[in-house]
Image (cartoon, grey):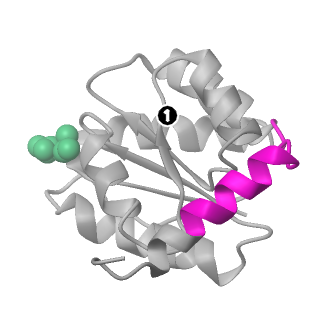
Amino acid sequence: MIIIGSDHGGYELKEFLKSWLEKRNMPYIDCGCDGSSVDYPDIAETVCRKVLKEPENNKGVLVCGTGIGVSVSANKIPGIRAALCTDYYSAKYTRKHNDTNVICLGGRTIGAELAAELLDIWLNTAFDGGRHALRVEKIKKLEEKPEDE
Ligand code: RB5
C-alpha cells in the first residue's frame, strides 16, 4: 500500500500524485493535509508510522514545499529510510542501494510531471541486496548506538 501525505506547501503536488496513482489503479491512503496549514513533522510522523505497520508491503510518499522538512522529520523515525529525490538517478539508486521506504518530493521545487516520473521509477525499482544489505544493516545499527560509542 502507498501511504501519501503533505503539508500545505506540498498539497497541490500530493493531489496531482493521487490522481496519477488513481489512473494506474494503484491504491493509496491519504494522510492529509486538506490544503490548510499544518506542521510537516506531524504529517511525516503519521505517514511513517503507517508505513512501519507493514514495512514489507508499504511505501510512503511525503511532500512539502522543498521536500526537506518532511525528509529530515521522517529520517528521525527508526526504521524509516527517506530519500529526497529531485533527479531520476537518485530515485532509482536510492531503492537499489539504500532500500528507502519513503520518497520525499518538493511541491515548490520540481514540476508535477517530473515528480510523477520520480515516483514511478522509485516504486518500480527493487533493492539490490548483497553488499548494500550490509550497509543498510549498518544504518539500522546507527539507530541503536548510544552517543558516546
Ligand atoms: C511550509 O511553508 C514550508 O516550510 C514547508 O512546506 C517545507 O518546505 C519545509 O521544509
Question: What secondary structure is found at the residue carrying circle 1?
Answer: helix
**Residue hosting label 1:** 16
Taking the spot 35% from the left edge, 36% from the top edge, the residue there is: 12
| Image spot of residue 133 (x, y percent) | 78, 55
Q: Residue 81 in magenta?
A: no
Look at label 1 and name its amino acid: Phe
Q: Is residue 128 left or right of residue 46?
A: right
Taking the spot 34% from the left edge, 32% from the top edge, the residue there is: 106
Taking the spot 68% from the left edge, 29% from the top edge, the residue there is: 93
In the rendered image, the vertical position of residue 140 relative to residue 70, given as above or below? below
Figure quadrant of the C terminus: bottom left
User: Which residues, given as a range, are shown in magenta?
Assistant: 125-140
| Image spot of residue 23 (x, y percent) | 74, 36
| Image spot of residue 107 (x, y percent) | 33, 31
> Does residue 51 appear in this view?
yes
- Of all residues, the one furthest to the front in this rendering is 149
| Image spot of residue 26 (x, y percent) | 77, 49
Taking the spot 56% from the left edge, 72% from the top edge, the residue there is: 141
Q: Is residue 127 left or right of residue 69?
A: right
> Does residue 29 appear in this view?
no
Quadrant assignment, res 139: bottom right
> Is residue 11 or residue 148 the one in the foreground?
148
> Is residue 102 or residue 34 the one in the foreground?
102
Number of labelled discs?
Answer: 1
